[in-house]
Amino acid sequence: MTEQPPAFGALARQRRSNLRIDPDRAVEPAILEALIATATTAPNHHRTNPWRFRIITGEGRRGLGAALAGELAEDMVGDADDPVRAAKVAKARSKYLRAPVMLAVASRTGPDPISTIENRDAVAAAIQTLLLAATEAGLASLWSTGAAVTSPAVARFCRFDPTDAVVGLIYLGWPTENLGPVERPPAEIIHIDRA
Ligand SMILES: Cc1cc2nc3c(=O)[nH]c(=O)nc-3n(C[C@H](O)[C@H](O)[C@H](O)COP(=O)(O)O)c2cc1C
């Protein structure tokens, strides 16, 4: 008997940021394409479909890390001996090898500032949709940002336009361990039903 996917609320609670991933077990391109197709169901104002996706695998992951590390190293001029900075550069070089797939996701700049904000909001919604779809498929995922999302070298490597905003670099792969759900603090909710 095939296992039933969890109902939506349970699936959402099951999603965790999980880097316990087997870096040597590939994810079939058809699965990645299906995840991206699901991600693009996210609402987007004026149907701008503002997302751009890049699937980075194999040596591409090394190229991505090298792009970021090279830029960080350049910024280190003057304090190349600082062991903390040196460790940061070394980590940047290797960190994307921790998963078999890195998905870079960017948002297009709109014709005006509000559209640009709305585009980015839509891309964030698309990423969360993709993370939930990945959870449903049994994949581990982690949305990362940090210095990479403002790095021109990373954007160039990903063939994004200079005006795009990189919204996330998503680690994806088959889990070596699944993390349990966590307790979430209750959200602030105020009911307003009077003028
Ligand atoms: C916009 C955004 C950026 C994030 N950037 C990073 C990151 O750079 N590194 C990282 O380890 N986690 C990153 N995360 C993951 C969060 O740290 C994670 O969601 C949080 O720890 C809660 O864990 P959970 O997703 O398992 O509930 C990011 C999450 C979001 C939404």
Image (cartoon, rainbow, N blue to C red):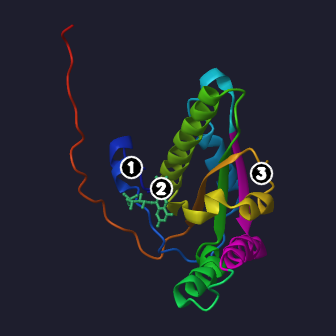
Q: Main secondary structure of the magenta part?
A: helix
18 lies left or right of 194: right
- Crowding around mark 2 (Cα neighbors within 10 Å: few <14, some 14 to 19, many 20+) is some
SS class, disc 1? helix
The alpha-carbon separation of the residues under discs 2 and 1 comes to 7 Å
Quadrant of the frame with the N terminus:
bottom left
The alpha-carbon separation of the residues under discs 1 and 3 comes to 32 Å
Q: Using the image, tell me which numbered label, if any, was put on residue 160.
A: 3
92 lies left or right of 159: left
Q: Which residues are magenta?
A: 51-76
Q: Quadrant of residue 89?
A: bottom right
Q: Position of residue 185 (x, y in %)?
A: 22, 50
Q: 15 or 119: which is nearer to us?
A: 119
Q: Quadrant of residue 123?
A: top right
Q: Position of residue 153 (x, y in %)?
A: 75, 64
Write down the residue under mark 2.
135
Q: Amino acid at mark 1?
A: Leu
Residue 94 in sight here = yes
Q: Quadrant of residue 98?
A: bottom right
Write down the residue under mark 1.
11
User: Image quadrant of ligand 1?
Assistant: bottom left
